[in-house]
Amino acid sequence: MDAPAPGTITMFSTTWCGYCQRLKSQLKREGIGYTEVNIEEVPDAADYVMSVNGGNQTVPTVVFPDGTAATNPSLAEVKSRLGASV
């Protein structure tokens, strides 16, 4: 999987995930760019999420420009990990 562009994230989600909806709303409000990948619709997306979550399909899983991932991060964590690029 390619890392997102500087200052943006990739968020793995599902349509029914309340935590995903909340994070998307917060990202939009803060003007943080993101690419959403639905793990139920995109081939291999669920496999990637499981690979960074100990075998679990836990969403939201966020990937940062440095290639690291976080599971259900807070908005504060996203902003902190994006650093000065936000």
Image (cartoon, rainbow, N blue to C red):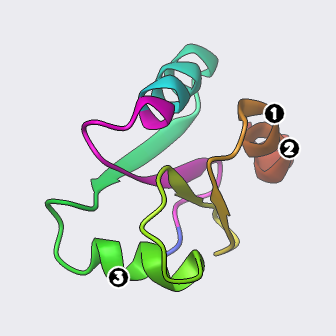
Amino acid type, residue under disc 2 in the picture: Ser
The quarter of the image holding the N terminus is bottom left
Amino acid type, residue under disc 1 in the picture: Ala
Residue 38 in the image: x percent, y percent?
Answer: 26, 54
Q: Which residue is mark 1?
A: 76
- At horizontal 39% and vertical 49% (from top left) the residue drawn is 35
Q: How many marks?
A: 3
Whether residue 72 is visible to the viewer of this picture, yes or no, is yes
- Of marks 3 and 2, which one's residue comes earlier in the chain? 3
Q: Quadrant of residue 15?
A: top left
- At horizontal 76% and vertical 49% (from top left) the residue drawn is 82
Dot 3, crowdedness within 10 Å: few (<14), some or many (≥20)?
Answer: some
Residue 74 vs residue 19: left or right? Answer: right
Dot 2, crowdedness within 10 Å: few (<14), some or many (≥20)?
Answer: few
Residues at circles 1 and 2 in contact by the CB criterion of under 8 Å: yes
Instruction: Find the magenta span and give its range.
Output: 4-20
Residue 9 colored in magenta in the image: yes
Q: Quadrant of residue 16?
A: top left
Mark 3 element type: helix
3 vs 2, front mark: 3
- At horizontal 51% and vertical 24% (from top left) the residue drawn is 22
Residue 80's mark? 2
Residue 20's mark? none
Residue 42 in the image: x percent, y percent?
Answer: 18, 66
Q: Which residue is mark 3?
A: 47
Dot 1, crowdedness within 10 Å: few (<14), some or many (≥20)?
Answer: few
Q: In the image shown, does 11 or 49 lie closer to the viewer? A: 49
Mark 1 element type: helix
* Identity of the residue furthest to the top in this view: 29
